Image: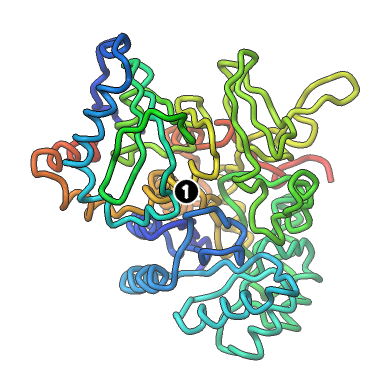
Amino acid sequence: MPLDLICPAGSLVSLKAAIDHGADAVYMGFRDNTNARAFPGLNFDEAQAAEGLRYAHDRGRKVLLALNTYPQPDTWARWTDAVDRAAKLGMDAVILADAGLMRYATRRHPQLRLHLSVQGSATSYEAVNFYREHFGIQRAVLPRVLSLPQVENVVQHTDVEIELFGFGGLCVMVEGRCLLSSYCTGESPNSAGVCSPAKAVQWTDTPAGLESRLNGVLLDRYGRHEKAGYPTLCKGRFEVGGDTYYAIEEPTSLNTLDLLPEMLKMGVAAIKIEGRQRSPAYVAQVTKVWRAAIDAVKKNADGFKPAPAWQAELNKLSEGQSHTLGAYYRPWK
Amino acid sequence: MLTLAVPTFPSRLFSRLPSAPPSLAFSLAANHLLWPALQTLDWEPLAGRRYAIRVKDLGLSLRFTVGPRGFVLDNGIPDLTISATARDFLLLLARREDPDTLFFSRRLVSEGDTELGLIVKNLLDALDPDAVLSRLPAPLARAARRLMAG
């Protein structure tokens, strides 16, 4: 089924909000650094995961488990144990980035469906087909670095289902390869499961503005009327050559509502919504808009035009409260 | 878009009062009304931490800690200070706004221990609204349902 809507769930309440508002599947993580949203108090213990699965399956929806960080040698068993628990719980798929963990999963749980995480950073059909050939992956989530013609090229040359990010926080263009936060904190998203560990983040209201710091390094200073963003190094303002500006990336959100007809036509299998760290209110609001949009585009792809109310609702929720088509639409290559 | 049928509050009603009496009143009221719904949460990792809730438009600062029997007045230096208007706090409580959304637009300010702030946010997000409503006194539950429905 094309254009399944895949929504984030950081808690059971969010999971139910996503299902109730029309998600075809939700994705979640366990309560440790086996997933890339390892924030304190977020995510699911085993009992909550079981209840979430029941809730989704009773309504004919699916649950995917993100195990998308890279296992470290001394704690390898934490990741394999998570794969075992996913299989035992009856997860509809696990979303993996690490090839070693894929090998473990295919040998120990051959029936378990594997998705290649965006953190796996596969941007060509050759890479996607490599994971298909060696580990039997059924779906790949593409990094937000490709233009739509490049996505189409991947879709046309693989049997693997392709999932694209449709909305939410935008990663600087090196997903799965980013070491920026390590530079400040010694912890990278790939190994520690977060870009900016909360314990290293400080917010201070100063006469000059609201300052965000990561382990003491000044990331940004927001004037009284400026919108704030997440305290990540990639979205900080830095002095370069005498100018102070967003030297790496602006805090803005991806929003691809406009591109839905093209995504449908090229055979994209699923649209993913970012934001497991967000609250149930966000999940409910975003899911509602995207459900309506996907239903509308399936009914009439050629006449599809995003409703202004949808865009306004999504803009309100966005980091930087503005949106971009990201790399999907660009004249250059 | 949400329709916002949330009352706006008259100016700086409490701004001239010292914070202890409102904080004491808040702790007593919260223990009576909210604690039955909140006591099932895992407060263990938060033992001994101090909070301040600043209701900006009312000039109100509520300072407390959470112990095994509920909210306790505590005027020590807060580990975490959350500031917003009364209306925005109500929207958050009613789950009609997402805290990150309010944060991006500078309507919600969190100062102090960021990790503590995330733990509290995620703890409250994980509360099942139906379970909370069923443990609130009936008139309050009715008012809360109206607020949540918008």
Q: Residue A287: in sight, yes or no?
A: no
* Left or right of A249, for residue B17: left
- Residue toward you, A320 or B14: B14
Q: Can you give x and y, in whole percent of width and height, for residue A312 in the image?
A: 46, 32
Q: Which amino acid does label 1 sit on?
A: Ile
Residue on which disc 1 sits: B119
Q: Residue A32: in sight, yes or no?
A: yes
The residue sitting at 57% across, 45% down in the picture is: A168
State the colouring used for the structure image. Answer: rainbow
* Left or right of A153, for residue B12: left
| Quadrant housing residue A150 | bottom right
Q: Can you give x and y, in whole percent of width and height, for residue A188 in the image?
A: 73, 54
| Quadrant housing residue B83 | top left
Q: Can you give x and y, in whole percent of width and height, for residue A216 in the image?
A: 72, 35
How would you rate the neighbour count of disc 1 (Cα within 10 Å): few for under 14, some for 14-19, many for 20 or more?
A: some
- Residue toward you, A126 or A263: A126
Rendered position, A145 above or below A87: above
- Residue toward you, A302 or A204: A204
Instruction: Indicate the chain on which mark 1 is placed.
Output: B
SS of the residue under disc 1: helix
The residue sitting at 44% across, 68% down in the picture is: A45
The residue sitting at 45% across, 64% down in the picture is: A44
Q: Can you give x and y, in whole percent of width and height, for residue B46 in the image?
A: 43, 49
